[in-house]
Image (tube, rainbow, N blue to C red):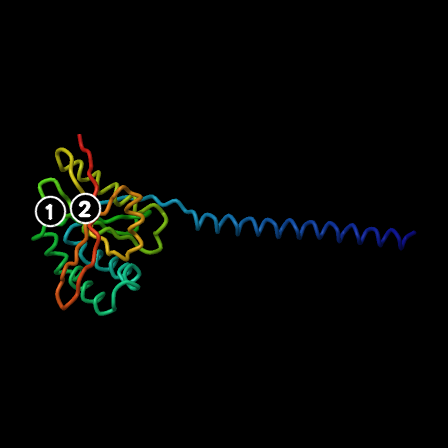
């Protein structure tokens, strides 16, 4: 009887230990799962501010982290380097701001720089979104929609009456689908020579904006 009682006690202890171990493993698994979900579906707080000439280095740094990821499979390395210098050398950004009157904006995600936008007035009622870019790791978070919507809101404040927004999109850029989703449509094409034998082969996309 004593032997039977000891065996029963050992089995009971083992069963209790197994339950404790199972509960511990389950809790660890649950915490890991919740952490991964939070990381994957983290909700970012986006804000936007006007850029100044003091932001030239910041814009250059952001562009250096975005440029190849965006166009590396579309353009040659030589053209990438040529265009990057043409558009993002600090002196060229200064020229865009002061001589060409491009209005730059910095987009922040949780107060950290995550993208940029530049807008140029190209006609009495027409504005070109020259640059709409965000860091690769921010794709899929809603930042693209935020950038376009905030750009339109800015124009509604500074422009009286309806206006048109346009942008040039490389004809092989997968972002075309996103722009269509945002309401822009192809209204033409262009093959713009930028020097050194290189061309920008773009769709011209546009959208009419009501502004009462």
Q: Quadrant of residue 150?
A: top left
Of the numbered discs in the image, which one, if any, rests on residue 122? 1
Contact check, label 1 and label 2, Cβ < 8 Å: yes
Position of 199 relative to 35 (above/below):
below
Extreme bottom residue here? 78
Q: Quadrant of residue 57?
A: bottom left
| Residue situated in front as seen by the camera: 7 or 76 | 76
Distance between the alpha carbons at the discs numbered 1 and 2: 9 Å
Extreme left residue here? 99
Please tell me whether mark 1 sits on a helix, a strand or a loop. Answer: strand
Residue ID for mark 2: 166
Residue 177 coordinates in the image, percent (x, y): 31, 49
Residue 183 coordinates in the image, percent (x, y): 27, 41
Residue beneath the point at 28% across and 62% down: 74
Extreme front residue here? 188
Residue beneath the point at 28% across and 48% down: 108
Residue 139 coordinates in the image, percent (x, y): 34, 52
Position of 146 relative to 11 (above/below):
above
């Amino acid at each position: 009887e004593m032997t039977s009682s000891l065996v029963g006690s050992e089995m009971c202890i083992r069963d209790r230990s197994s339950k404790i171990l199972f509960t511990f493993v389950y809790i660890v698994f649950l915490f890991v799962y919740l952490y991964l979900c939070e990381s994957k579906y983290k909700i970012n707080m986006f804000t936007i501010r006007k850029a100044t000439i003091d932001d030239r280095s910041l814009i250059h740094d952001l562009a250096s982290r975005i440029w190849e990821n965006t166009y590396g499979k579309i353009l040659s390395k030589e053209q990438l380097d040529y265009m990057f210098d043409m558009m993002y050398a600090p002196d060229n950004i200064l020229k865009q701001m002061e001589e060409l009157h491009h209005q730059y904006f910095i987009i922040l995600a949780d107060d950290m720089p995550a993208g940029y936008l530049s807008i140029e007035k190209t006609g009495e009622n027409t504005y070109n979104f020259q640059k709409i870019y965000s860091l690769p790791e921010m794709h899929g978070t809603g930042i693209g929609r935020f950038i376009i919507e905030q750009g339109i809101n800015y124009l509604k404040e500074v422009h009286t009456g309806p206006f048109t927004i346009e942008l040039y999109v490389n004809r092989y850029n997968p972002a075309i689908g996103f722009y269509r989703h945002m309401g822009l449509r192809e209204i033409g094409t262009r093959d713009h020579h930028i020097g050194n034998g290189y061309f920008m082969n773009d769709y011209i996309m546009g959208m009419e904006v009501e502004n009462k």
